[in-house]
Amino acid sequence: MRFAMLRRLSLPEHAAVELIVGVALIAAPFGLGFGPAGLLTSMAAGAVIAGLALGEPHIATHMAADGAVAAALLAVAVALAAHGESAAGGVLAAAGAGELALGMATRWTRRA
């Protein structure tokens, strides 16, 4: 039986997905009616993620930043949901889980 190996995302593909997620987090509060805390958190997280996508840090730095951003998103999502901002908490939890999945699906090498 043959098992197909999953194709890993290249760094440019990883950056494209991060940019889309960052812009979506910046826009989400306006379409989903987040409260003040959710609005500020979502926009700040979107700016950080978009900045990661547009910057070209060292690969190890980018990997570490992705992990830190994912952990921060998940922690903030729990805090927001606990304080009554369930829509913002849900969106940020999904973004955090997506950032973790994106990191696992990325081929962390540059091709010459």
Image (tube, grey):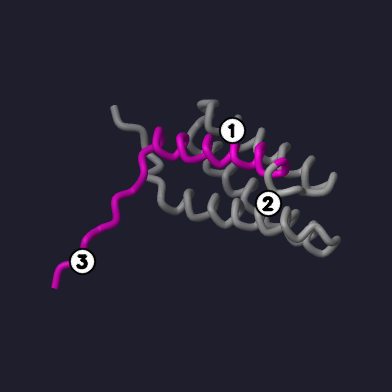
Q: Residue at x 36, y 39 (%)?
A: 10
Q: Which mark is residue 99?
A: none
Label total for image: 3
Tell me how far mark 3 sits from mark 1, CA to CA.
35 Å
- Residue 53: percent from the left, percent from the top? 53, 32
User: Within 10 Å of the Cα at label 2, are there few (<14), some (14-19), or many (20+) other Cα atoms?
Assistant: many
User: Within 10 Å of the Cα at label 3, are there few (<14), some (14-19), or many (20+) other Cα atoms?
Assistant: few
Q: Residue at x 41, y 51 (%)?
A: 105
Q: Can you identify the residue that label 3 sits on?
A: 3
Circle 1 SS class: helix
The amino acid pointed to by label 2 is Leu
- Residue 87: percent from the left, percent from the top? 72, 57
- Using residue 101 as the reference point, say whether residue 26 is left or right of it: right
Tell me how far mark 2 sits from mark 3, CA to CA.
34 Å
The amino acid pointed to by label 3 is Phe
* Predominant secondary structure, magenta span: helix
Judged by depth in the image, the label closer to the viewer, 3 or 1, is: 1
Quadrant into which the N terminus falls: bottom left
The span shown in magenta is: 1-30
Q: Mark 3 or mark 1, which has the lower sequence index?
A: 3
Q: Can you identify the residue that label 2 sits on?
A: 73
The image quarter in which residue 3 lies: bottom left
Q: Can you identify the residue that label 1 sits on?
A: 50
Quadrant into which the C terminus falls: top left
Circle 3 SS class: loop
Tell me how far mark 1 sits from mark 2, CA to CA.
14 Å
Q: Residue furthest bottom?
A: 1
- Using residue 79 as the reference point, say whether residue 90 is left or right of it: left
The amino acid pointed to by label 1 is Ala
The image quarter in which residue 48 lies: top right
- Using residue 66 as the reference point, say whether residue 108 is left or right of it: left
